[in-house]
Image: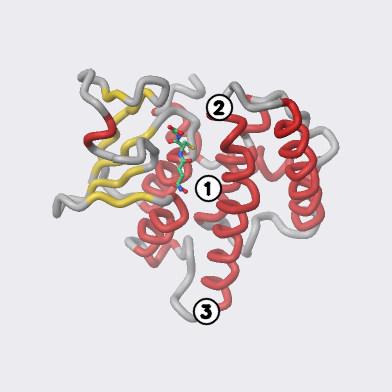
């Protein structure tokens, strides 16, 4: 399978999940400013919405939506328990967190991060909303090492999205548990490997 990604974008979560599950994959880098691939061809020909992540399976089908791709990849290697068995409380909690990250963090950040022309009033509203959600995460992580039990694909997603705070110079100093959690996830060898492969760390 092939993952279409852009360094540090939400596709990083799927990249981490592929490595954590030991799934063989290829990477195709997308320039999101021009929506082109390395050979100069239009990414819109692959992904009509122009978004990463996109996972092209070996049967030729193409799939999008980070939260869905994360569940799919986790299910490829159930022994790693990155999402939990269908019907289990682990599954419910991981999918609950995936949905939270998608709708309460990812898509709150998105307009601002990808659209530099965003109005100041929108930036303020986004900052206020994120502050509430970061505070909630910080309270949760005071007594939990990860979002739900052991490391899951929800952690790969939250790690990726919360780190966007750095791109936008939003300080995380008021959220010490959240900061410690980000450091914990960052220290995972497969997370380091994904960050290196995307050129985000040496
Ligand atoms: N609904 C999609 C959204 C994906 C998304 O927002 N991707 C961003 C990168 S994190 C993107 O490709 N933006 C490029 C653009 O807006 O043209 C998902 O959840 O996977």
Q: Residues within 10 Å of mark 2 (few under 14, many from 20)?
A: few
Q: Decide if residue 182 is on the left or right side of residue 30.
A: right
Asked if 179 appears above or below 88 in the picture, the reply is: above
Q: Is mark 3 on a helix, strand or loop?
A: loop
Whether the residues at callouts 3 and 1 have beta carbons within 8 Å, the answer is no
Q: Which of marks 1 and 2 is nearer the N terminus?
A: 2
- The circle drawn on residue 88 is 3
- Label 2 residue near ligand 1, CB within 8 Å: yes
Which residue is at a point 37% across and 23% down the rendered structure image?
A: 31
Compared to 124, does 2 lie above or below? below
Q: Name the residue under label 2.
A: 115
- Residue 136, image x and y in percent? 78, 54
In percent of width and height, residue 127 lies at 75, 36
Q: Residue furthest left?
A: 59
Tell whether label 2 touches label 3 (CB within 8 Å).
Answer: no
* Secondary element type, mark 1: helix
Please identify the residue farthest to the bottom as the structure is shown: 87
* N-terminal label among 3 and 1: 3
| Whether the residue under disc 1 has CB within 8 Å of ligand 1 | no
Mark 3 → mark 2, Cα distance in angstroms: 39 Å
The residue that appears at 74% across and 49% down in the rendered structure is 133
The mark lying in front, picked from 1 and 2, is 2
Indicate the position of residue 105 as horizontal and vertical percent values. Answer: 63, 46
Is mark 1 in CB contact (under 8 Å) with mark 2?
A: no
Q: Report how far apart the C-alphas of labels 3 and 1 lie in the structure.
A: 20 Å
Q: In which quarter of the image is ligand 1?
A: top left
Identified at 62% across, 38% down, the residue is 109
Q: Give residue 57's position: percent from left, percent from top.
A: 22, 51
Q: For the point 24% across and 46% down, which residue is it?
A: 56
Q: Mark 1 points at which residue?
A: 156
Between 65 and 58, the one lying in front of the other is 65
């Amino acid at each position: 399978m092939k993952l279409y990604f852009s360094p540090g974008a939400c596709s990083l979560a799927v990249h981490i999940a592929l490595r954590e599950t030991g799934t063989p994959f290829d990477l195709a880098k997308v320039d999101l400013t021009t929506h082109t691939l390395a050979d100069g061809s239009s990414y819109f020909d692959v992904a009509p919405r122009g978004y990463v992540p996109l996972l092209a399976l070996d049967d030729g089908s193409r799939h999008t939506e980070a939260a869905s791709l994360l569940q799919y990849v986790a299910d490829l290697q159930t022994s790693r328990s990155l999402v939990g068995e269908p019907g289990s409380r682990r599954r419910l909690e991981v999918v609950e967190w995936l949905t939270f990250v998608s709708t309460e963090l990812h898509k709150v950040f998105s307009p601002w991060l990808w659209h530099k022309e965003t109005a100041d009033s929108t930036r303020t509203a986004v900052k206020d909303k994120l502050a509430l959600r970061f505070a909630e995460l910080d309270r949760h992580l005071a007594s939990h090492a990860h979002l739900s039990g052991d490391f899951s694909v929800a952690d790969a997603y939250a790690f990726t999205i919360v780190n966007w705070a750095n791109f936008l110079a939003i300080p995380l100093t008021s959220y010490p548990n959240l900061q410690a959690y980000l450091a914990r996830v960052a220290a995972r060898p497969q997370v380091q490997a994904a960050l290196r492969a995307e050129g985000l760390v040496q």
